[in-house]
């Protein structure tokens, strides 16, 4: 009976077995392809999360350099100032030459008179601070027409107490003018720093980053309690996420498939347990998944080999799409990272390298030259009487002079040389593979190209010359600081000798 049954129904049974076999192979193929896509999606998302995490850390590093403490430090170290503070309108010390004061409230009786409107802002007065006779001023800082801060500045005038007379009065008057010019010049810098610190924050960075990408839907920083600290979505900031586990998985948000990727990374100093969560558009991956399912259903009705061929083609197509998308994201991240790195290495006014990057290159080139016994020379270039340019034509003219002169100096150098703004009007050029004779020729060329043509600014012709200190690597040099300080000493001699000249540093034996 069984044999008869088999004979009677052998074709349907064979078709059924074949159908089950093809279906099983199709289901297996679908499941395998889906898992591969999920693994690929996880790897791609991890790369994106790590890239944006690195970009956010770089953003935090750049922004941390834009603070009032840096400005106060520069001013206090560069000038003979007895006291320098930046106060809130209520007297809280925001920044000071003396770090231990920061956060305290100014208790000086003269400042209380300012608060009581018994003393006017922008007026000089004389008093004794820490047993020293000083001339002081409270200078206002305004933003959008509103008082936002006050500078407390004082200078030591004890030397003027010894001798009195018309000459002393004139010297004090000149000192007042210099102080007012200084305060006006840093007023804009303080306002700009405050504007940058208040307008550029992590939320803005995340919003801009998400807007510039195609497949990132949301980026958020979350603390250990699942509270959103920063996000490109302002409505989420401050909220606590109602999820059992912040684990990477494929989820649906507002009807849209997204992949949630989370990494633990202390992006903020006060929040070492913060986690970065990204929601990445998973539509491409889910569409591929659906396509695999449709293919599995179709291949159940056709030949087994054809089913495998279709599945294999879809598999490699999906992998190629994932690879192309990953490469595109990596290119975008590299471009953004490169832009941020260039901002951290470049002087915004002259477009030359900044001091930090210049010192890094000098250290590297010094070690390379010392190791392989190659030549290296250094030029320290200073614009003569630059303060007079600012005093005579204004600081905007001074900025234009720095830009044009920097461009001329750069045109005299080779592509392999490094040139940057070291500070103020001082420019440093590092000349690898350059002996002293060639360094002297380059310096003479810079002197000529600067002095031969005045700088034109708003119809005014500004004559500019430079003084240059030259030094080259010798056996007795122990480190780059020694090489640099000797070049600086040569610059001092050039200025002392009448300016507009290049002086090569000479050792004692050479001088003899």
Image (cartoon, rainbow, N blue to C red):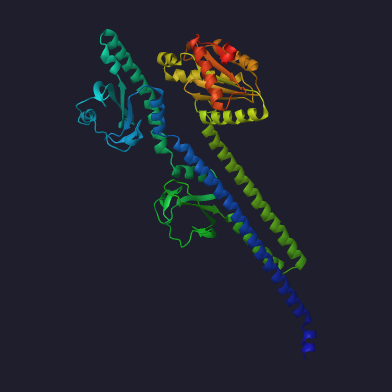
Residue at 54% over, 59% down: 249
Residue 17 is left or right of residue 173, and the answer is right
- Residue 299: percent from the left, percent from the top? 71, 66
Could you say which quadrant of the image residue 243 lies in? Answer: bottom left
* Pick the front one: 172 or 185: 172
* Pick the front one: 512 or 357: 512
- Residue 62: percent from the left, percent from the top? 48, 37
- Residue 214: percent from the left, percent from the top? 56, 47
Is any part of residue 214 visible from this angle? Answer: no
Q: How many numbered markers are drawn?
A: 0
Residue at 61% over, 18% down: 412
* Pick the front one: 50 or 278: 50
- Residue 377: percent from the left, percent from the top? 61, 21
The C terminus lies in which quarter of the figure?
A: top right
Q: Is residue 437 above or below residue 327?
A: above
Is any part of residue 468 visible from this angle? Answer: yes
Could you say which quadrant of the image residue 451 lies in? Answer: top right
Residue at 54% over, 24% down: 482
Residue that lies at the very extreme toward the bottom in this rendered image: 1
* Pick the front one: 303 or 494: 494
Q: Is residue 77 above or below residue 391?
A: below
Residue 221 is left or right of residue 312, and the answer is left
The N terminus lies in which quarter of the figure?
A: bottom right
Could you say which quadrant of the image residue 410 lies in? Answer: top right
């Amino acid at each position: 009976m069984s044999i008869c049954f088999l004979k009677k129904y052998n074709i349907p049974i064979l078709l059924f077995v074949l159908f089950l076999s093809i279906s099983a192979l199709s289901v297996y193929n679908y499941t395998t392809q889906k898992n591969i896509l999920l693994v690929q999606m996880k790897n791609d998302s991890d790369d994106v999360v790590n890239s944006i995490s690195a970009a956010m850390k770089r953003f935090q590093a750049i922004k941390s350099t834009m603070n009032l403490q840096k400005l106060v430090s520069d001013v206090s170290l560069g000038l003979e100032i007895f006291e320098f503070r930046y106060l809130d309108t209520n007297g809280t010390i925001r920044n000071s030459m003396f770090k231990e004061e920061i956060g305290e409230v100014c208790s000086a009786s003269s400042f209380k008179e300012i608060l009581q409107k018994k003393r006017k802002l922008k007026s000089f007065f004389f008093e004794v601070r820490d047993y020293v006779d000083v001339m002081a001023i409270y200078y206002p800082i305004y933003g959008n027409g509103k008082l936002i801060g006050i500078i407390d500045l004082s200078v030591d005038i004890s030397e003027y107490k010894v001798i009195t007379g018309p000459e002393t009065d004139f010297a004090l008057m000149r000192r007042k003018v210099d102080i007012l010019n200084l305060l006006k010049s840093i007023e804009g810098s303080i306002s700009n720093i405050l504007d940058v610190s208040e307008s550029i924050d992590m939320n803005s960075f995340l919003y801009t980053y998400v807007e510039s990408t195609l497949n990132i839907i949301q980026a958020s920083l979350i603390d250990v309690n699942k509270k959103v600290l920063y996000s490109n979505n302002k409505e989420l900031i401050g909220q606590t996420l109602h999820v059992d586990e912040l684990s990477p998985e494929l989820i649906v948000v507002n009807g849209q498939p997204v992949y949630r990727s989370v990494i633990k990374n202390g992006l903020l100093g006060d929040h070492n347990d913060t986690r970065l969560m990204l929601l990445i558009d998973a539509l491409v991956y889910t569409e591929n998944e659906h396509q695999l399912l449709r293919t599995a259903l179709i291949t159940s009705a056709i030949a087994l080999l054809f089913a495998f061929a279709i599945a294999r083609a879809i598999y490699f197509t999906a992998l190629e799409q994932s690879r192309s998308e990953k490469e595109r994201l990596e290119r975008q991240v590299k471009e953004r990272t490169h832009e941020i790195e260039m901002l951290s290495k470049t002087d915004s006014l002259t477009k030359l390298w900044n001091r930090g990057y210049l010192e890094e290159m000098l250290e590297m080139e010094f070690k390379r030259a010392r190791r392989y016994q190659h030549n290296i020379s250094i030029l320290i270039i200073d614009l003569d009487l630059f303060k007079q340019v600012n005093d005579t034509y204004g600081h905007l003219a001074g900025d234009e002079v720095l830009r044009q002169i920097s461009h001329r100096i750069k045109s005299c150098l080779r592509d392999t040389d490094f040139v940057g703004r070291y500070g103020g009007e001082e420019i440093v050029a590092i000349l690898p593979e350059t002996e002293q004779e060639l360094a002297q020729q380059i310096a003479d060329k810079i002197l000529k190209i600067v002095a031969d043509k005045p700088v034109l600014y708003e119809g005014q012709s500004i004559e500019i010359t430079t003084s240059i200190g030259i030094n080259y690597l010798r056996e007795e040099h122990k480190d780059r600081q020694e090489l640099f300080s000797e070049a600086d000493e040569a610059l001092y001699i050039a200025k002392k000798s009448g300016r507009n000249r290049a002086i090569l540093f000479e050792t004692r034996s050479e001088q003899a």
